[in-house]
Structures are given as C-alpha cells and as structure tokens.
Image (cartoon, rainbow, N blue to C red):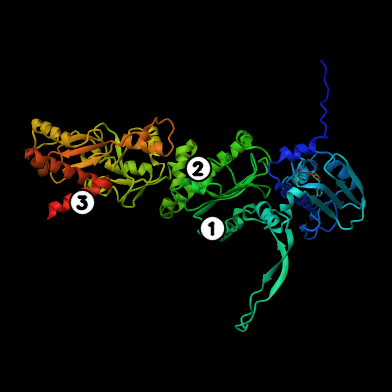
Amino acid sequence: MATGKINVSVDNIFPLIKKFLYSDHEIFLRELISNATDATLKLKHLTNIGETDVEYGNPVIDIKVDKENKKIHVIDQGIGMTKEEVEKYINEVAFSGAEEFLDKYKDSAKDSGIIGHFGLGFYSAFMVAHKVEIITKSYKDEPAAHWTCSGTTEFTLEDADKQDRGTEIILHINEDDEEFLEENRIEELLVKYNKFMPIPIRFGTREETLPLPDDAPEDAKPETKTVDNIINNPDPAWTKQPTDLEDKDYKDFYRELYPMQFEEPLFHIHLNVDYPFNLTGILYFPKMSQDMNMQRDKIQLYQNQVFVTDNVEGIVPEFLTMLRGVIDSPDIPLNVSRSYLQADGAVKKISSYITRKVADKLKALFNNNREDFQEKWNDIKVVIEYGMLTEDKFYEKAQKFALYPTIDNEYYTFEELKEAIKDNQTDKDGNLVILYASNQNEQHSYIEAAKDKGYKVILLDSPIISHLLQKLESSEEKITFTRVDSDHVDNLIKTDEEKISKLSDDEKEKLKGDFEKVVPKEKYTIQMEAMDSNAAPLMITQPEFMRRMKEMQQTGGGGMFGMGNMPEMYNLVVNTNHPLTAEILSAEKETQQRLIKQSLDLARLSQNLLKGEELTAFIKRSFEMVK
Ligand code: ADP
Ligand code: MG
C-alpha cells in the first residue's frame, strides 16, 4: 500500500477566492474590520492577563476612502505583526492566526470574542483590489513590516518606518469595483455589518448640532461641532446580562435595531446559553398582522457581534421567523451554504433551544399576568397557532397557555374550555362539540342562535386556523370543532331528542319536490328539518368538512387533491314548521315558485351569497312587492 500527501498548489488560489469563496464582494470590508477587531481584542487580552505592559488605551479602527487615488485604508491600533508573523499568518493561505491564538490561550481567551476562524478572510480583499498592502508594527519591540501583493503568488516583504503600533491595510480598488470608493456605499456597509462590533469604528467626522442654551435669543442659530463619526455601538444590549437591563433598555435597543419601526414591541425574550453551544440574543414579539409573509426576515444573525445575515431560515424554526431581534452565536459557521447549515447538528440544537425558550417565556407571561397576556393574545396568536401547527414540542407546551376566546371576550385555555362546555355541548355519541365563528359580523345570526341555546361560541379567525383545528381534533380524544354556520343550530350538537313536525311525511316529500323544481340542485342539497316555528323558514349552511378542506387548500394544505377547485356546495335547510312553508305547500304553482325564489334569495342574502345581476333583480323584485 502506498501512502502520501496530496499537494495543494496555491498558484490558482486567487482566481478561486475571487470566484467561489464569497459570493458577495461587499463582505471584504466586514472581513478586514473583523481582523482589525481581532487584533485589538488580542492586545486587550494580553494586557489583561499581564503578558505585556504596553498601554492599551482607547483604540479605534479607522476606515478611510481615498477616492482620488482609488484606495481604501483600514487602520487599527491592535497587536500588529512582526515580519515573521506576516510570513506565517498572511503568506500561508488558510492558516488562521485567530485559531492559533485561541488554542494558545485556551482557557483565558474563551470569551475574548475573537472572530476569525478559517484563515481565509484576509484574502477576500482581492475580490475588490488588484493590489493589497499591509503596513504593520507589532506590539513587540521590532521594526515595522511592509507587505505588498498584486494578486499573484508573488509578494514583497520589507522593513517599514511605521512608528505606532498596529496595522494598516491598503486596498488598491479594481476599476470594476469603484462603487466601493463612494462614501455612501461604505457607510451603508459599515452600518449593515459592523453596527454592533466591539471596537469603535471611525469613518471620518460629522457635524453635530449643539443644543441652544435656555437663555438664547429667539433668532439664535444653533452651533455645530465637528465630532468623530463613530459607526457602531460596541456594547449592544444582547451582550449584557439580563439582570443589568431594564425594560426601557430593551425598548431602546429595539429602536436601534429598527429605526423605521414606530410601534413598540409587545415583549422580549433574552437568550443566553453557553452549553452545549454558545448563543446570546434578544427576540421581540411585535404586533402581528394577519399576513404572515409580510413579517419574515427581520431577525438578524450575528457571529461575535459581526452581522452575518437577516435570513435565519433553517436556524430559527419557521414559525419564529415572524419575530424580530438578534441572535449571536460563534458556533454558527459564517461562510457556508444554507443547506449545510440546515444539516448542521449545532444549528439543530439552537433551533430547539430557541423554541423551548420562547415557549417558557410565553408560559411565564401567562402565569405572571394572565390579564395582560389575554390583552396581547390577538397580536401574538398567529405565531403561537402557527407554532402549534408546525412544531410538536411547541404544541405540547402551548397547551398550557394557548387561548380560546369566546365571542364575549372570555378567555379559556383548552382544558378550561372543555370543562366549561362539557355539560351543555356533548353530543349523543359523547363527542365534545366546540362551536366557533370566524367572523363575528358575517356569522352574526348563527352566533346569536347558538348563544340563545346557551352554547359558548369561540372566535377563531387566524388564516391557518382550519389546519390547527384538524390537528387538535386528531390529537385530542372525542373533540369536534364545528363552525356555527355549518348547520342549523339544532343540528350543531346532535341529541336523541325527537322533533315534532307539523307536516306529515307525504307533505314533506311533496314540498321537497316543489323546492327541487326551483332550486338549482348542483348548488344546493335540500334538507327538510322540523325546527322551531320562530326560526327562519329557509337557511343556507355549508358543511364543516367541506368548508374546512377548501380553506386548508387555499392556505397551503398539502394532499388536498383539487378541493380548492371544487364547486361551492351548500345545504338549503327548509324549516317544515314555519308558517311560510305551509303556505308554499298549498300555493298555486305560480305563487309557489315566486315564494320559493324570493325566500331562497333572502337566505342567500343573509349569507352574503347574493351578488351582481341576481342581487339587482332581487332588489327590483322586492320593491315591486312593497308598493
Ligand atoms: P482568520 O481571521 O480567520 O484567522 P484571516 O485570513 O482573516 O484569517 O487572517 C489571517 C491572519 O492574519 C489572522 O489570523 C491574523 O493573525 C493575521 N492578521 C490579519 N489581519 C490582521 C491585523 N489587522 N492585525 C494583526 N494581524 C492580522
Ligand atoms: Mg479574519
């Protein structure tokens, strides 16, 4: 057996980096600032543990754009490099000095916040620059070094006369990448990627308007002062301990994250774990709108305070992508593809941790102040119901705090609801029938009829509710959800009670035939019912099953073969005990047809089903009858 080493030639590394390593050119700045930050944090660490007695001071990172000479400078006051270190860290592609540092200072540097990982970040500079220079002076007492490279494997390395500690990276920008010589573009990148990085980043200066003194004359002009233009907030709220923060701090941070957002968040969840993975962050529950897709992509993902992406799909469970806030984890790989992320074990654990934290927080809010939780229910229910539908773990936990409000604003948990209705709403087969409405206005008459019978009517109006009901019915024993307008009130909850009909069976048969002559049978199934004589003579209902399947398909239910395209089918319930029905039965053919047609239209009108030309004709006909 022969063994050996595969030789990887670096000759072709530059074209590869330019083409494949990073799809996005703009990240070069993020990488260089990450290195400058690392260099500064390393120095901080060494001074902290007493390995050096150099003055740490108040270091900043400077970004300068020299449009005229087509250069960008990134300057730090960090640890710097000796000539030997440049040889080692820069010339050896894919050797990470960051990893080496973390290895060397394992225990003490664990929480130092060092960003680098792969030893590739620096070379992203060649995506936008045809030539890169490094001028660097180590904190050690050694001469400065000057490294130059024009995007080939050739480089020069010589002494330099830089006196102050730190590193300056100079990019000679490609003609194709001159957008990066625009100040606005650079500022945009700094705000996007570096807004919460731990070392102050200065991008030139800006004018600040000073407040007028109290006794200033009316026509006084406010004075301005030139100040450093610091891009970032080095201590964002999520890096602090929850005990050091007040409600106001969380709200202020929300404002900082979403300056264009005027509504306050409903509440927040502070995430903080260090085992078995590292993760910090703050999630906010905003007021949810019914349109779930509108609110995606608001959570920002960071790695050691460096912005990575605002697409957290695969990292956060789908139902939580409706929330806002930040997640920061050094364990999330920075530059890898999404499909890799989704398969990554750490990422999966992160996802289930977040789900659990959110469930725990909701439970605590419910327990600590139920009234307040009830008030917020309408604004958060979409997320919770969606979570119950899609995550089994969350479903279990949510049983304790998910609410089922009645039309009259009583809020029940599922257990409480079952208890409250079990005496009055159990049908003859022992099924507990939960009556609900999806629209208080449109289903008004049905709601009233149900309430008159002493039933409780729950209001469930989220877009995905039919899917959730399906799930509840299949995971709970002997439970059915029935919408109030899916049948006549006497049939909503079936009992053994015999109903007395004023009409004989023969009369009913004849009446049914009379109706069938007028009513289009491809649309309506006629159903003869002996109901209260005060109830409506004619009524249109849509069976629960049919309607729900249709709804589920419209909101993306898989496997519901063609239900959405099925014709609308209704039941036409004829009250055989109503005086009008008796009149129809005994009327002359012409009168009979007119009465049936008019009553049918009235029934349709009450279900909002009479529209267009038919509505116009109906109104005209009705006026004729009135006069
Ligand atoms: P990584 O940051 O993943 O280690 P990079 O390719 O970004 O890899 O950088 C390679 C190494 O070069 C760094 O680990 C560090 O040792 C060194 N380096 C890069 N930039 C600087 C800097 N501004 N100051 C000091 N050292 C630097
Ligand atoms: Mg790096």
Question: Is the residue indicated by label 2 positioned so its CB lies within 8 Å of ligand 1?
Answer: no
Q: CA distance from mark 3 to mark 1?
A: 48 Å
Q: In the displayed structure, would residue 164 be above or below residue 359?
A: below
* Residue on which disc 2 sits: 319
Which residue corresponds to the image point at 80% horizontal and 60% vertical from the top-left? Answer: 57
Instruction: Give the quadrant of the N terminus.
Output: top right
Q: Is residue 274 above or below residue 345?
A: below
Amino acid of disc 3: Ile
Q: Is residue 358 above or below residue 495?
A: below
Element type where label 3 sits in the image: helix
Is residue 445 among what the camera can see? Answer: no
**Image-quadrant location for residue 425:** top left
Along the line of sight, which residue is nearer the eye, 230 or 181? 181
Badge number at residue 102: none
Residue 601 placement (x, y as % from top left): 21, 45
Foreground of the two, 180 or 371 = 180
Q: Quadrant of the C terminus?
A: bottom left
Tell whether 166 sits left or right of 385. right
Mark 1 is surrounded, within 10 Å at the Cα level, by few (under 14), some (14 to 19) or many (20 or more) other residues, namely few
Q: Nearer the viewer, mark 3 or mark 1?
A: 3
Note whether residue 23 is visible: yes
Which residue, given by chain and number where applicable, does mark 1 sit on?
Answer: 261
> Considering only order in the chain, which callout, 2 or 1, is on the residue closer to the N terminus?
1
Q: Which amino acid is tagged 1?
A: Gln
Please tell me how crowded label 3 is: few (under 14), some (14-19), or many (20+) other residues with Cα within 10 Å: few
Residue 289 point in image, percent of width and height:
45, 51
Q: Please tell me the numbered disc located at residue 619.
A: 3
Residue 608 at x, y = what percent? 27, 47
